[in-house]
Amino acid sequence: MSTIATKTPSAKRSLVSEVTDVMQLIEDFSTLLIRETAALKKSDFNVVDTLQPSKRRLALEYQNMVTALSNRKAEMASLDVAAREKLVKARTQFTLILNDNLVALESAKESTRRLVGKILDAARKSVVDEKQTNYSAKGQAQAYKTSTLSLSVDQKL
């Protein structure tokens, strides 16, 4: 994965240069998202975790570059048709890759939510099924289900 250097705003760069950098960034970001999507589908969260710093950096660079290009809308008309088509194609492909990634993230989130729910259900069932012996004010033994309120409060927190 190549790294796009952040350019200084002091010298105005050529539009072709900026478009080329954006397309390279889109390619790098797409590669990272494809790797993350594959890791999410395999539930390889170690790989997902290692990609996060690069993902944040690339997202910030992408936002900055797109903002810089959007400030040059008038000049975009002067860009040759082939370059504009390549940019549109790259952004369209990137959008598809990004959507696949978002679906994989949502699936992983839902799977995690279901797993946590099953763990809480099992814990609740084991706690509610256990009975303890308590003694009344008169000294008589009585059995009751334990920790139902406590588990309910903890789950809501």
Image (spheres, grey):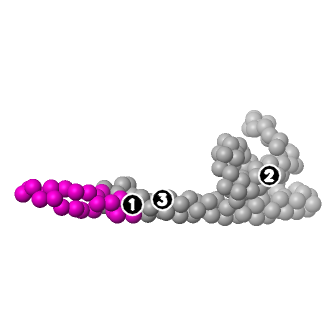
Residue 22 seen in render: no
The residues tagged by marks 2 and 3 sit, at their Cα atoms, a distance apart of 35 Å
Q: How busy is the neighbourhood of tag 1: few (under 14 within 10 Å), some, or many (20 plus)?
A: few
Residue 90 seen in render: yes
The residues tagged by marks 1 and 3 sit, at their Cα atoms, a distance apart of 11 Å
Task: Give the mark nearer the N terminus: 2 vs 3.
Answer: 2
Helix, strand or loop at label 3? It is helix
User: Is 54 displayed left or right of 117 in the figure?
Assistant: right
| Residue sitting at the far left | 138
Identify the residue at image location x=80%, y=48%.
28
Q: What residue span does the magenta drawing correspond to?
A: 125-147
Residue type, label 1 = Ser
The residues tagged by marks 2 and 1 sit, at their Cα atoms, a distance apart of 46 Å
The quarter of the picture where residue 97 lies is bottom right
Identify the residue at image location x=33%, y=62%.
128
Residue type, label 3 = Ile
Residue tagged by mark 2?
31
Tag nearer the camera, 2 or 1: 1
**Quadrant for the C terminus in the image:** bottom left
Total numbered circles: 3
Helix, strand or loop at label 2? It is helix
Residue tagged by mark 3?
119
Tag nearer the camera, 2 or 3: 3
Expressed as whole percent of the image width and height from the top left, the position of residue 130 reads: 33, 60
Residue tagged by mark 1?
126
Tag nearer the camera, 1 or 3: 1
Expressed as whole percent of the image width and height from the top left, the position of residue 145 reads: 27, 62
